Amino acid sequence: MIYELRVYTCLPGRMPALQKRFQNHTLALWEKHGIRQAGFWTTLIGPASNDLTYMLAWENLAEREARWNAFLADPNWISARADSEKDGLIVANVASSLLQPTAYSSVR
């Protein structure tokens, strides 16, 4: 199992639009494409109050590539993303890291 850590830095005032997009569109599309989330977080205390952080769980890199690419090409995702950004861009930056649990991790 590998995990993908993704951090979205929102443009000022755009966090509600990003959260709405995840709640109303993205999560259902992920389910359709077999993408498994391992959790979502916002920053309670720290330097990144405009960040939405989440993790995805993958069996391997090949699964990630196939499922993620299918999601990105889904016409429903393309439409939902465009609709959510009709008032302007939401995300200023996306950082992604693929993580492998250590032998002593409680998460494998």
Image: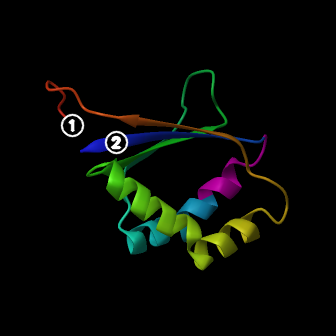
Q: Residue furthest bottom?
A: 75
- Element type at mark 2: strand
Residue 75 position in % (x across, y down): 61, 78
From this view, report whether residue 36 is shown above or below residue 40.
below
18 with respect to 2 (left or right): right
- Look at the image and tell me in which quarter the N terminus lies: top left
Q: Is residue 97 left or right of residue 83?
A: left
Total numbered badges shown on the rendered structure: 2
- Whether residue 59 appears in this view of the structure is yes
Q: Which residue is mark 1?
A: 107
Amino acid under label 1? Answer: Val
Q: Residue at x 60, y 71 (%)?
A: 77
Q: Is residue 15 one of those drawn in magenta? A: yes
| Disc 1 and disc 2 in contact, CB within 8 angstroms | yes
Viewer-closest of 75 and 65: 65
Disc 2 marks a residue whose amino acid type is Tyr
Q: Which residues are magenta?
A: 12-19
> Compared to 60, does 25 lie above or below?
below
Point out which mark residue 3 bears.
2
Q: Main secondary structure of the magenta part?
A: helix
Residue that appears at 29% across and 42% down: 2
Query: Going 68% across and 48% down the picture, which residue do you hit?
Result: 15
- Residue at position x 26%, y 52% from top? 59
Quarter of the image that includes the C terminus = top left
Work out whether 7 lies above or below 15.
above
Indicate the position of residue 44 as horizontal and vertical percent values.
54, 30
